[in-house]
Image (spheres, rainbow, N blue to C red):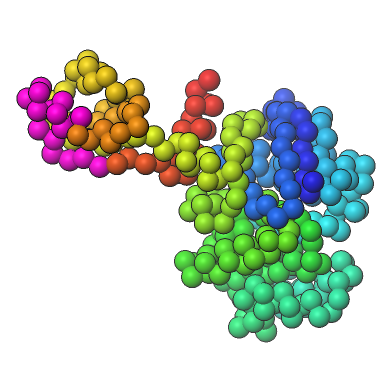
Amino acid sequence: MSISVEKVTKVYGTQKALDEVSFEINKGEIVGFLGPNGAGKSTLMKILTTYLQPTDGVAKVGGFATNEAPEPIQKMVGYLPEHNPLYLDLYVREYLEFCRGIHQAPKTRIEEVIELTGLTPESHKKIGALSKGYRQRVGLAAALLHDPEVLILDEPTTGLDPNQLVEIRQLIQTVGKNKTVFLSTHIMQEVEAMCDRVIIINQGKIVTDKPLKSLLKEEQKQTLLVEFDQPISEEVLYSLSILVHAKLHENNQWILEFQTNNDPRATLFDFATANGFRILQLQTWNKNLETIFREKTKKSKDK
């Protein structure tokens, strides 16, 4: 088990940032860690890197507890924090040499990670002269220098343009085949493109922890967006025996959820005809990860 978190709680004064958080991550998994701002994502990542210690519970990386054996964990973890701390007056190779010396990594690794992260065209410059996207690449290169078993990446694609996003996504997917990757991001499309599994945290508690494919599949019910030619009441809609949920979207548009193994569209057209309505628009209404994220975090807040 690469990462094990068991009932981890973190309290700052009177504020509980993490509330008995538990999960496990195996080698070879790329796990997206999602949550609103202030949900506890960065706090947990800092605990896993041994920068912070939990108030209660046990966090382990590679079998070592963060509060008992920080040094072995620091050797096996590559960390890119949310606010990427760099020495802006150093040249790219100069900074990576400094990081290499700390980790006692082979000198050949500098050129390897420069090529791996696409830094070659900018590697002769001072870090302060780089764009935000290239500074992010320098931070990622530093995290990869000692060839860590576990990568913890806090907002790794911040500041990247669309082309850079594709390149870094491919890089994370490549290194994720032989490592454990635990990353946070607010870009849901990146999670859908990169991750095997999704953990959603809200107000310090885990509200979802599932493989991405099964999460998306189970949320895809028979749902249609329907626009009628005139107002229609919920009471009339619920006379449809296969309808399980109706929600007014806007004007005369409704989001209708059906419980049936058959295509509900024919039944819906017959229903409209029988009640003197016409259907002006009809389309499937499948949820993406962004929609699921909003629903999961909103539900948790409302409780």
Closest to the observer: 102 or 222? 222
Residue 184 % position (x, y): 62, 49
Q: In screen coordinates, is 137 left or right of 280?
A: right
At x 78%, y 69%, the residue is: 145
Q: Please report the residue visible at 63 percent of the width from the left and 62 percent of the height from the top.
A: 172
* Residue 201 in sight from this viewpoint: no
Residue 22 vs 91, above or below: the answer is above
Q: Position of residue 121 (x, y in %)?
A: 61, 83
Instruction: Using the image, determine if residue 230 lies above or below residue 66.
Output: above
Single out the residue that lies furthest toward the front: 262
Between residues 4 and 122, which one lies in front from this camera angle?
A: 4
Up the image or down, 281 lies above or below 255; here it is: below
Part of the protein shown in magenta: 267-283
- The part of the image, by quadrant, that contains residue 66 is top right
- Please give the name of the residue rendered at 72% of the width and 45% of the height, measured from the top-left corner: 25
Q: Is residue 259 visible?
A: yes
At which x and y percent is residue 244?
34, 22
Q: In the image, is 265 to the left or to the right of 229?
A: right
Say left or right for 255 vs 279. Answer: right
